[in-house]
């Protein structure tokens, strides 16, 4: 899979693991819209998922790039690391997500959209 898709209803970890296997193996890129509570998954670049959400009505300031590891558990399944997160004018100076509240919102959305439990 090279084209991202918008996830707005829950999917299983196994389904996400299958998408990841088709792309990078054990992980997959995603962009979360913290305002709309949706995410785009599976673009070759975080910018691809970002563009998909922008075309669907999202606002850039609400979009945050993450990597998902469906086979991992607890906090290890989400990695906050993306070039689209670098926004010095908005107080985010790293590829991560510097604000703890924003990280919590991203995690809550990802956990709601990807059902808990082990992947495949």
Image (tube, rainbow, N blue to C red):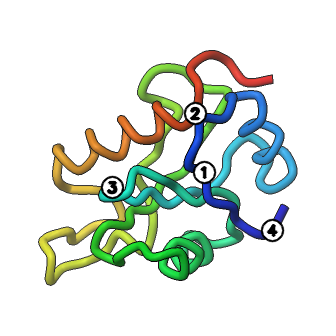
Q: Mark 4 points at which residue?
A: 2
Badges 4 and 2: C-beta atoms under 8 Å apart? no
Distance from Cα at disc 3 to Cα at disc 1: 13 Å
In the rendered structure, find residue 7 and report the number of the disc placed on it: 1
Image coordinates for residue 35, horizontal then vertical, percent? 30, 58
Helix, strand or loop for disc 3: loop
Q: Measuring 60% from the left and 35% from the top, which residue is drawn there? A: 10
Distance from Cα at disc 3 to Cα at disc 2: 15 Å
Q: Mark 3 points at which residue?
A: 34
Position of residue 98 in the picture relative to residue 69 (left or right): left
Whichever of callouts 4 and 2 sits on the residue coming sooner in the sequence is 4
Position of residue 113 in the picture relative to residue 61 (left or right): right
Q: State which quarter of the image contains the C terminus.
A: top right
Helix, strand or loop for disc 1: strand
Extreme residue in the top direction: 117
Distance from Cα at disc 1 to Cα at disc 2: 9 Å
Nearest-to-viewer mark from 4 and 1? 1
Q: Name the residue under label 2.
A: 114
Q: Measuring 60% from the left and 51% from the top, which residue is drawn there? A: 7
Whichever of callouts 4 and 1 sits on the residue coming sooner in the sequence is 4
């Amino acid at each position: 899979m090279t084209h991202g898709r918008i996830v707005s209803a829950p999917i299983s970890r196994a389904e996400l693991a299958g998408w990841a296997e088709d792309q990078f193996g054990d992980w997959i890129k995603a962009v979360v819209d913290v305002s709309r509570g949706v995410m785009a998954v599976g673009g070759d670049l975080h910018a691809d998922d970002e563009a998909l959400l922008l075309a669907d009505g999202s606002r850039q300031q609400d979009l945050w790039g993450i990597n998902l590891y469906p086979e991992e558990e607890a906090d290890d399944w989400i990695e906050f690391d993306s070039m689209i997160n670098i926004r010095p004018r908005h107080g985010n100076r790293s590829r991560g997500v510097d604000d703890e509240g924003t990280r919590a919102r991203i995690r809550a959305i990802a956990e709601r959209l990807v059902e808990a439990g082990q992947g495949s």
